[in-house]
Image: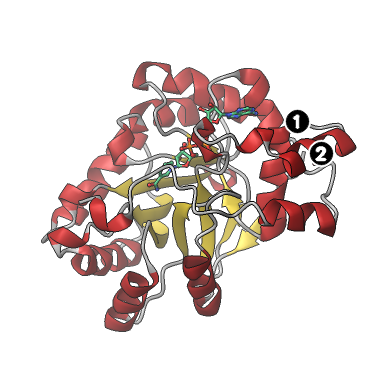
């Protein structure tokens, strides 16, 4: 199954669908990422915070898949943003992953109360220039944060990875990203299973019409919106199902009906509250 890729503003390409490992038990990560690689995923989204970079690295090494066929993202945690800490943090992440570089390194949250996100971004630029991250971006950043770091450094993030699903579309952020050429990565694309997205009438109706599952409909909606997604599951059948979203297309009426589900239904804290 060919997974489409998108071009980032820095010219590098990213597979539009990947596999996320938030809350995947470190002891289970190698096995679950191996399942994902066997199912055909080539893009893995992890973070230092998740505590499972070593398991991801073991699965990548054991897979025998060529490095240039893989796309690996990890993230800088809030308590490493100050001073030269980001330079040490990327080396530690690379060591755990068993890689010489990642494809994408992100500032995980702006953590505004710390006052260090601009320093973190300046250090990510150094990390990119040193060849330790091919592309660099941010996560959970609001338009004001993005404008500030881009103006101060002259470097625009390649992506902003934000909570985004039909019930919480963050139009203010996605509009700002579109204006700056920043790709939107949608975390919690299925609403983390916390919000009854998969029972919404337009989702259920489209699933019946196309003979697919409600989760596949929601993921397909993201694809057609142009988002990058990396749904998480620990079940092999769902891992396969979540990648199998390229054999059908939602009509514009189906797409619009799902877009109309936007209602501020966040599953997370506001970026100002995560420090
Ligand atoms: P998700 O929306 O991918 O939801 C995962 C949950 O959805 C699963 O635990 C399961 O309950 C359910 N699910 C998965 N596949 C299903 C299927 N086929 N049918 C029915 N239910 C299904 O949530 P997520 O894991 O939080 O987000 C995906 C990835 O985004 C994470 O693994 C992580 O890589 C990233 N993420 C980033 C941040 C950030 O701050 N940058 C925050 C959270 C997540």
Q: Which circle, 1 or 2, is nearer the viewer?
A: 2
Looking at this view, is 67 or 247 the one in front? 247
Residue 119 figure quarter: bottom left
Residue 182 visible, this angle: no
Q: Residue at point 49% right, 31% down?
A: 60
Evaluate if marks 1 and 2 touch, with contact meaning CB atoms under 8 Å apart. Answer: no
Point out the image quarter for the N terminus. Answer: top right
Looking at the image, tell me whether mark 1 or mark 2 is earlier in sequence order: 2
Q: Residue at point 23% right, 41% down?
A: 92
Find disc 1 in the rendering and name its residue.
213
- Residue 177 position, x and y percent, is 50, 71
| Residue 134 versus residue 205 in the image, above or below | below
| Residue 262 versus residue 74 in the image, above or below | below
- Residue 183 position, x and y percent, is 54, 64
Q: How crowded is mark 2: few (under 14 residues within 10 Å), some or many (20 or more)?
A: some
Q: Residue at point 64% right, 60% down?
A: 6
Determine whether the residue tagged by mark 1 lies in a helix, strand or loop: loop
- Residue 14 position, x and y percent, is 58, 55
Residue 126's label in the rendered image is none
Looking at this view, is 61 or 259 the one in front? 259
Determine whether the residue tagged by mark 2 lies in a helix, strand or loop: helix
Find disc 2 in the rendering and name its residue.
205
Residue 201 figure quarter: top right
- For the residues labelled 1 and 2, the Cα–Cα distance comes to 10 Å
> With 221 as the anchor, is 183 left or right in this view?
left
Looking at this view, is 215 or 124 the one in front? 215
Counting labels gives 2
Q: Is ligand 1 within 8 Å of the beta carbon of the residue shown at mark 1?
A: yes
């Amino acid at each position: 199954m060919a997974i489409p890729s998108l071009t980032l503003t820095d010219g590098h390409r990213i597979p539009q669908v990947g596999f996320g490992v938030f809350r995947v038990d470190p002891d289970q990560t190698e096995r679950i990422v191996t399942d994902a690689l066997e199912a055909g995923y080539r893009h893995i989204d992890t973070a230092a915070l998740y505590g499972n970079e070593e398991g991801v690295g073991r699965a990548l090494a054991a897979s025998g898949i060529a490095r240039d066929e893989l796309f690996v993202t990890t993230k800088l945690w809030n308590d490493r943003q100050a001073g030269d800490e980001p330079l040490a943090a990327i080396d530690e992440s690379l060591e755990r992953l068993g890689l010489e570089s990642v494809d994408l390194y992100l500032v995980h949250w702006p953590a505004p109360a710390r006052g260090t996100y601009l320093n973190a971004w300046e250090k990510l630029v150094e990390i990119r220039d040193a060849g330790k991250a091919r592309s660099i971006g941010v996560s959970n950043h609001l338009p004001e944060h993005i404008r500030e770091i881009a103006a101060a450094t002259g470097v625009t993030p390649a992506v902003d990875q934000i909570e985004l699903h039909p019930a919480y579309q963050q139009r203010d952020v996605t509009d700002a990203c579109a204006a700056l050429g920043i790709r939107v990565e949608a975390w919690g694309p299925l609403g983390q299973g916390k919000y009854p997205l998969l029972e919404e009438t337009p989702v259920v109706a489209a699933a019946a019409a196309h003979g697919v599952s409600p989760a596949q409909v929601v993921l397909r909606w993201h694809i057609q919106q142009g988002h990058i997604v990396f749904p998480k599951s620990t079940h092999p059948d769902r891992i396969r199902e979540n990648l199998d979203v390229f054999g059908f297309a939602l009509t514009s009426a189906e797409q619009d009906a799902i877009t109309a589900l936007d209602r501020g239904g966040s599953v997370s804290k506001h970026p100002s509250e995560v420090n």
